[in-house]
Amino acid sequence: MVYHLWTVPVVSCQYKKWQRPEVMSLEDTLQHIVEHKSSICRYGDGEFNIALGNDIGFQHMTGNMAERMRQVLDSDDDNILIAIPSIFGDLSMFSDFSQPWWKEYRLCNLDNLKTLLKSGRRYPNSFITRFTSDYKEDQADKLIPLYRKIWDGRDIYIVEGEQTRIGVGNDLLSNAKNLYRILAPAKNAYDKYDEIVATVKNYAPLGALVILALGPTATIMAYDLAKMGYQALDLGHFDIQYEYHIRGIHSKQPIPGKYVNEASTAGQTVDDSVIKDENYSKSIIERIK
């Protein structure tokens, strides 16, 4: 009763007075990457939690992770996009699940968001990888053609968790020239941070396109790789969202043969036998345990 009669009205008033960040549209964010060959580091509630020093489900707090997460969030390099969720304005475009969740989140975490984010700054949109399940209307038809422009005719170095399998069983990366995969731990990948970065440097030439799907570790790693001279894209979830799109699914569900950390326990128990694509195993150039 106290929460609904006092806390919510007071915090809602404070929220309205806050000079909130501006967030670019999904299309503008991807178009910027296409035109400028930018790198991108994405933040969501999990990355914000880590920046505040808290564990999340598949990444425990370790070493300097919180400090690095804040460092990247505060950075302003011209060609490294620091993306956040587009949750500070109208939420009506979001799904019936996402809309109330984010409305509650921004109120309950107002003080933290004020601490982490720069008032009035224009951020790219981190929801570019959540275009199906989080929206009332599937955004894939608008975004996938832009995605394909990024890697059209290019080699892609994919750094992903074991069993993530970006592009396996679908045509998402079909217009790329070659795919090279570095497999890393699905959980607590930050524990192997230096080894993963060293492996990328060992195999990928400077200027190469590197796609990362390693949870919060990818947010920091994309920044570091971009500073080294790579085009590094933190794109966790985008393959799963494409799977939802082609299957007509609008909720977070298990996908056969792929690890889906946001789905039920079934999505985190992967049957490897359903993967019949021989090109997948041929694309693996290194495994980091």
Image (spheres, rainbow, N blue to C red):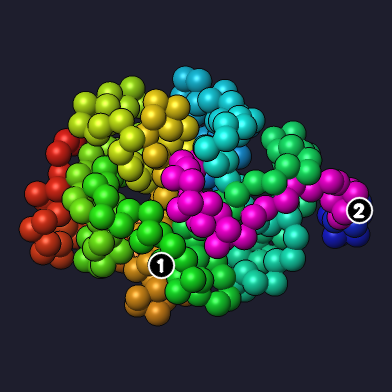
Tell me which residue sits at (78%, 40%) in the image. Answer: 119
Q: Please, what is the three-letter code of the amino acid marked with disc 1?
A: Pro
Q: Which residues are magenta?
A: 12-41
- Residue extending farthest top: 63
- As drawn, 92 above or below 73: below
Left or right for 33, reference 167? right
Left or right for 229, reference 46? left
Return the x and y of residue 186 as percentages of the image width and height.
32, 42
* Residue 249 visible at all: yes
Tell me which residue sits at (88%, 54%) in the image. Answer: 16
Residue in front for this viewpoint, 222 or 257: 222
Return the x and y of residue 237 as percentages of the image width and height.
41, 55
Q: Please, what is the three-letter code of the amino acid marked with disc 2?
A: Cys
Name the residue carrying label 1.
Answer: 145
Mark 1 element type: helix
Tell me which residue sits at (33%, 22%) in the image. Answer: 194
Name the residue carrying label 2.
Answer: 13
- As drawn, 9 above or below 96: above
Quarter the N terminus occupies: bottom right
Return the x and y of residue 184 as percentages of the image width and height.
27, 37
Label whose residue precedes the other's in the sequence (1 or 2): 2
Residue in front for this viewpoint, 10 or 154: 154
Quarter the C terminus occupies: top left
